[in-house]
């Protein structure tokens, strides 16, 4: 039987049974995820400026796929506004060592998502949960169901160069493996020129590890009451 990956606290916030940390705060999850990852990577503008037919996003920690769903929705919006733009495809690569069960995934989506169009995308994702690769029209999703330490090899084998990263592996203090300098060095090597990253944390050791990996790093106001978060890019 699938070991429960999630418990729910009194505010209906999903907590990891492995890391004693929240996936996200249920209240404001959509706004926070949009602010940190979609806006943090300036994705709508990046789509507009993109000169190739495919935009590639990498993520550390697939979880409930909420970030993927919001990205997918943003991309569909972009495509509907710019149907003749050269950018036609979105490819999303993520890693997940502790996948949610189908019931857990559906419960998270139902608790967090109220927007009908996003729920429709969530339902499509729910039917493909255990597939490591799925194609939703012009959007592809590839999940490496493995430990983070094997993610860069997985990407390198597929000749992937990432245009934008979502670094999202629970609190750095509780899960340092997802924020290691060696991981960021591998990510940097797999980042396209001018590719960007965004993450919700501004922890000192995360910032140093990103800088040591080669990224240009900048602090930005965090979401809501959070003071700071980090964004950055590869410039050479
Ligand atoms: C904060 S959650 C990600 C939330 C997610 N982006 C979403 O949209 O729901 C962090 C994720 O990282 C995964 N994770 C933690 N440690 C990992 C490891 N060593 N290797 C791979 N995945 C890991 C967890 O299982 C969890 O799903």
Image (spheres, grey):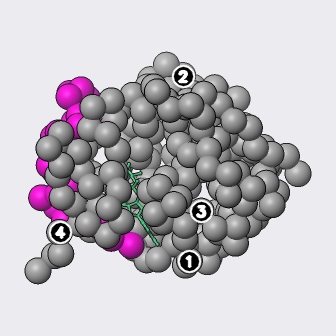
Indicate yes or no: mark 1 CB to ligand 1 under 8 Å.
Answer: yes
Residue 36 image offset from top left, x and y in percent: 52, 36
Residue underneath mark 2: 82
According to the picture, the residue beneath numbered tag 4 turns out to be: 4
| Residue 54 shows in the view | no
Tell me, yes or no, whether the highlighted magenta stretch contains residue 108: yes
Closer to the camera: disc 2 or disc 3?
3
Which of the pair 223/73 is nearer the observer?
A: 223
User: Circle 3 sits in a helix, a strand or a loop, which is it?
Assistant: helix
**Magenta stretch, residue numbers:** 97-119
In the rendered structure, which disc, 1 or 3, sits on the residue that comes first in sequence? Answer: 1
- Residue 61 vertical position relative to residue 201 in the rendered view, above or below: below
Left or right: where 200 falls relative to 196: left
For marks 2 and 3 on the same chain, the one whose residue lies earlier in the sequence: 2
The residue sitting at 79% across, 54% down in the picture is 211
Q: Earlier in the sequence, mark 1 or mark 4?
A: 4
Could you say whether the residue bearing mark 4 is in a helix, strand or loop? loop
């Amino acid at each position: 039987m699938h070991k429960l990956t999630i418990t729910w606290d009194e505010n209906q916030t999903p907590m990891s049974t492995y890391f004693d940390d929240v996936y996200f705060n249920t209240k404001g999850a959509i706004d926070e995820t949009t602010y940190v990852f979609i806006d943090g990577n300036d994705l709508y503008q990046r789509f507009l400026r993109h000169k190739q037919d495919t935009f590639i996003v990498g993520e550390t920690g697939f979880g409930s796929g909420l970030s993927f769903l919001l990205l997918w929705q943003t991309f569909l919006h972009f495509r509907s506004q710019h149907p003749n733009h050269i950018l036609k495809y979105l490819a999303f690569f993520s890693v997940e060592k502790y996948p949610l069960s189908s019931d857990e995934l559906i419960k998270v989506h139902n608790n967090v998502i109220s927007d009908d169009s996003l729920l429709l995308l969530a339902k499509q994702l729910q039917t493909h949960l255990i597939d490591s690769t799925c194609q939703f029209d012009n959007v592809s999703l590839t999940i490496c169901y493995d430990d983070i330490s094997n993610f860069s090899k997985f990407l390198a084998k597929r000749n992937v160069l990432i245009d934008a990263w979502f670094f999202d592996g629970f609190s750095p203090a509780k899960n340092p493996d997802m924020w290691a300098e060696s991981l960021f060095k591998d990510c940097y090597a797999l980042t396209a020129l001018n590719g960007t990253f965004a993450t919700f944390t501004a922890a000192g050791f995360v910032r140093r590890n990103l800088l040591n990996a080669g990224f240009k790093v900048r602090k930005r106001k965090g979401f809501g009451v959070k003071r700071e978060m980090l964004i950055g890019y590869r410039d050479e």
